[in-house]
Image (cartoon, rainbow, N blue to C red):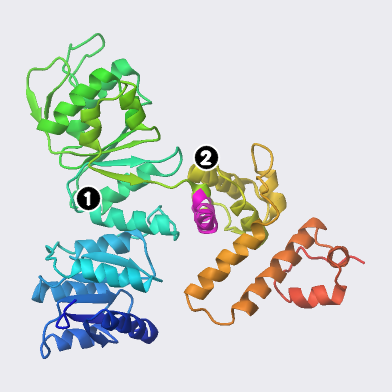
Amino acid sequence: MTNNSRLWVVDDDRSVRIVLSQALRDAGYQVHGFDSADTALSALLTEALPQLVITDVRMPGTDGFSFLEQLKKRHEGIPVIVMSAYTDISSTASAFRGGAHEFLSKPFDLDEAVSLVARAMPEKFPVAAVRPSETGSELLGSTPAMRELFRAIGRLAQAPLSVLITGETGTGKELVARALHRESPRANKPFVALNTAAIPAELLESELFGHEAGAFTGANKKQIGRFEQADGGILFLDEIGDMPAALQTRLLRVLAEGEFFRVGGRELIKVDVRVIAATHQNLEALVREGKFRADLLHRLDVVRLQLPPLRDRKTDVPALAQRFLEQAATQLNASAKHFRPEALARMEQHDWPGNVRELENLCWRLAALAPGDSIGLKDLKACLRSNELIVEPQNVWQQALARNTQQLLSHREQNIHAQLREQFDRILLETALDFTDGHRQQAAEKLGLGRNTLTRKLGTSRTGKNNEST
């Protein structure tokens, strides 16, 4: 590492700026820190230009995206790494559209950050037009696997490459495809989706490529297929592993040449379509069994995105559940509802074999059937299917506590013991009150507490249902 490599770190958070700058200096870089984008922009006029810039997104005054845009207009060859604690598709896609080289999620490992800078230093990156990002994406998650997925979507949205999305049923593969479309230069063109497993084999060819009038019995008029409908945009082929062998050959021709004939037609149709495919099956195994063409797999699998099952990202369950509950209440014109902590804790214990779709369906039932605006364990059990939510071993809550503590420590939270103690007391007391139908005296006895102690701990957190019984 040469000592003349100049880096700028732009972040209004003094602790992050100092720690990151020092780690980079220890790695041999010359580092200049700025507490705002505005001061960094001013320095472009008076100081030697940096060879790489690392900038936060949310800052007073000019934010990180605006800073990135202005920097690229003046000096498009300077690589920029955007960092933020708010890692979602819109943020990452906006960063990459603006010409960022990489998106660094906070909190980050210092060694990882230094390694990322080392990889970025020799590169030159093209500038893409900045487009206002959309909000309200249905994809939600903060686990490392989801952050990596969002970052990949943000990058891949800009590239005209075929993408294969894999994952179990219900993990949200179509949502990923729609996000790739929404954040891409094709966003104003059609997004056409087709589940190849849902169409009978004898009709699938016509569905994909269209047909001419008289091509077969019942074909009374010409019909354009999904490829023509998606011209200029994106065609999403779900459950591609179920496609019949004969159609795999035709699909391969379209992917290779960008042209095809309608069924019964003689006119060569040319289209510009980006194909995104998805499957829950092991396509490599299907290739070995002779059920899927290896050359078609290579065409589709230019880049692969693997969606994690919900059981592998259970800490995302509370945020997902509340989002689905709010959406369902809005669609049903029902009153707003929220989950009690004990209900969320129980939902985190479930393995969710149906993945995100199963969770969403449960939230819709709760929005429609739960009588009050606060959903507890009894409401949860009343709306469940397939018996009860799976209760995991006794050490689950200790594991969850350890994960929560680790997250708070990594975010440099203060008074962690007080925070967690308050949450522990609240969940314990509310669960006991649910068990005793709101009778404080009985709840206190079962917990081994005095009634006055229970009342004091509850404070004003519960009203209405907690009618006192003596």
Q: Amino acid at mark 2?
A: Gly
Q: Is residue 317 visible?
A: yes
Q: Which residue is outermost to the right?
A: 470
Span shown in magenta: 312-328
Q: Amino acid at mark 1?
A: Ala
Residue in the picture at 9% in, 75% down: 75
Question: What count of labels does the image hold?
Answer: 2
- The residue carrying mark 1 is 187
Q: Residue 281 colored magenta?
A: no
Q: Which residue is outermost to the front?
A: 1
Residue 157 horizontal/vertical position (percent)? 23, 52
Residue 114 horizontal/vertical position (percent)? 29, 72
Using the image as rendered, state which of residue 414 and residue 219 is in the foreground: 414
- Quadrant assignment, res 58: bottom left
Q: Which residue is outermost to the left?
A: 267
> Image height check: is 239 above or below 438?
above
Q: Is residue 127 left or right of residue 414?
A: left
